[in-house]
Image (cartoon, rainbow, N blue to C red):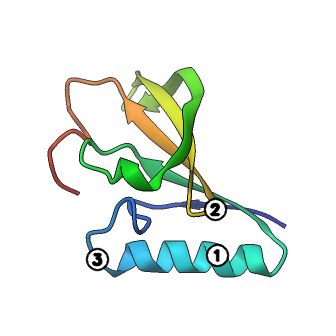
């Protein structure tokens, strides 16, 4: 089965509480049972980049609908302790994920 998890945290890269542990642990367990799991996360400015391997551009020109308009985004990909993760970076003056905390 192909499973996509969308979350605001995934330990150890983004961890503010228990959700990060659950997302990482659940993805590991699902993969251990033969599923293909990918995780979609925000690209915070304060992430633990030292736990991401193989960081590369996945999409450079993604437009996401937002309240009758659209926000230009980039998407990056990397492996967090064996888990495939995609990180969304919106190019917006609203600084959705550029705030120094989770």
Q: Which mark is residue 39?
A: none
- The answer to whether 55 is drawn above or below residue 12 in the figure is above
Q: Closer to us: mark 2 or mark 3?
A: 2
SS of the residue under disc 2: loop
Q: Are marks 1 and 3 in contact (CB under 8 Å)?
A: no
Give yes or no for contact between labels 1 and 2 (Cβ–Cβ under 8 Å): yes
Asked if 102 appears above or below 19 in the picture, the reply is above
Q: Residue at x 41, y 69 (%)?
A: 11
How many neighbours does mark 3 have within 10 angstroms: few (below 14), some (14-19), or many (20 or more)?
few
Residue located 24% across and 48% down the image: 46
The residue singled out by tag 3 in the image is 17
User: Residue 3's x, y, as percent?
Assistant: 72, 63
Residue picked out by circle 1: 28
Tell me the quadrant of the picture where the N terminus can be found. Answer: bottom right
Q: Which mark is residue 82?
A: 2
Residue 95: x %, y % from top left: 21, 34
> The residue tagged with tag 1: helix, strand or loop?
helix
- Count residues near mark 2 (Cα–Cα under 10 Å), then give few for <14, some for 14-19, many for 20+: few
Q: Residue at x 25, y 39 (%)?
A: 96
Q: Nearer the viewer, residue 91 or 84?
A: 84
């Amino acid at each position: 089965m192909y499973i996509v998890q969308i979350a605001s945290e995934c330990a150890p890269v983004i961890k503010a509480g228990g959700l990060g542990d659950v997302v990482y642990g659940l993805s590991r367990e699902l993969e251990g049972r033969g599923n293909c799991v990918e995780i979609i996360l925000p690209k915070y400015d304060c992430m633990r980049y030292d736990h991401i391997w193989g960081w590369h551009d996945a999409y450079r020109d993604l437009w996401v609908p937002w309240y009758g308009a659209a926000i230009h985004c980039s998407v990056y990909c990397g492996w967090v302790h064996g888990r495939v993760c995609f990180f969304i970076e919106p190019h917006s003056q609203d600084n959705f994920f550029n705030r120094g905390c989770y």
